[in-house]
Image (spheres, rainbow, N blue to C red):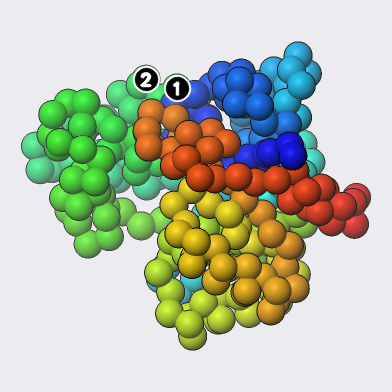
Amino acid sequence: MEKVDLHVHSTYSDGTKTPKELIEIAEKEGLSAIALTDHDTLDGIPAALAASDKSPVELIPGVELSTNFDRTEVHIVGLFLDYTNNEINNYLAKQRQSRIDRNIQMCQKFCDIGINITYDKMCELYPDAVITRAHFADYLVKNKYTGDRNEAFDRYLSPGKPCYVSRHKVDPKDAVNIIHAAHGVAVLAHPVLYHLGKEQMNALLDNVCSAGIDGIEAIYSTYKPADERYIRTLAKEHNLLISGGSDYHGDNKPHIQLGRGMGHLFVPSEVLDNLRKRSLSYR
């Protein structure tokens, strides 16, 4: 049975592999398709499609949108997007500016505590990327301010820590609408990672289902068997399609491999087929 990976990041957000390298790795892993789902950007899609044209690996244009639900950051993945669509590109341009403003403020906070990070330096180090807190964490590790990325977040970058700056994020249901406007299929990403209780999870599902979300990520690198069973049950209860992916970030998450996750991940191609069929209703 053919396998796919529908949650992958490149150097255009916080991954360490270029779109071309992702296609090459996917081919070596025997994947029939991958979705490029960088954080709040579609900039890597043209390069990924160009590489896919020379490979048996199909490239699904995607994105991972950051949203806020009841003080929890929730991600919505879009698949089969029209990456030239004006509405989603206008939205992403506003999000990019919001990140830039936030990053400049974070740099100032670092300088205020004696850690010399400038926004120009971050842009020089990560010229193509949507710069996220993960990039700041990498900078801190590489320059010996912290031992690893977790320490960087725990000491400086998490909410309530000295260099954290919040930024505006849309409601999850609004992200679903934006994806649908770009003729894409909307998927609730890695819901287990939000550590929501039953009541909160139901409230989140009510929110996204009110906008007609299409699917939920039931197959994921860090899920235990009980997690997958739980999400599959939620999918059935809410009439949602199944999606799945590794959330591959290259060297930034070295324990997770493309298409294989932590070794047990397997997303069958029928998952992609079902999502593809749904996408036709938005054309």
Seen at 78% across and 52% down, the residue is 275
Q: How many marks?
A: 2
Q: Residues within 10 Å of mark 2 (few under 14, many from 20)?
A: few
Q: Where is residue 121? Give x, y as percent.
A: 30, 24
Residue 143 vs 153, above or below: the answer is above
Question: With 112 as the anchor, is 205 left or right in this view?
Answer: right
Q: Where is residue 198? Give x, y as percent.
A: 48, 82
Q: CA distance from mark 1 to mark 2?
A: 5 Å
Seen at 58% across and 54% down, the residue is 219
Q: Answer whether labels 1 and 2 touch (C-beta < 8 Å).
A: yes
Q: Where is residue 70? Give x, y as percent.
A: 45, 75
Which residue matches tag 1?
Answer: 127
Res 209 → quadrant: bottom right
What is the number of the mark on residue 4? none
Task: Name the foreground residue: 33 vs 86.
Answer: 33
Q: Residue furthest top?
A: 54
Q: Secondary structure at mark 2?
A: helix
Question: With 115 as the anchor, is 60 left or right in this view?
Answer: right
Which residue matches tag 2?
Answer: 124
Seen at 48% across and 34% down, the residue is 257
Q: Amino acid at mark 2?
A: Glu
Q: Residue furthest bottom?
A: 199
Q: Residue furthest left?
A: 114
Question: With 278 as the anchor, is 89 left or right in this view?
Answer: left
Q: Where is residue 36? Give x, y as percent.
A: 63, 36
Task: Name the foreground residue: 4 vs 110.
Answer: 4
Question: With 219 as the anchor, is 110 left or right in this view?
Answer: left
Q: Secondary structure at mark 1?
A: loop
Q: Is residue 163 visible?
A: no
Q: Amino acid at mark 1?
A: Pro
Task: Name the foreground residue: 56 vs 209.
Answer: 56
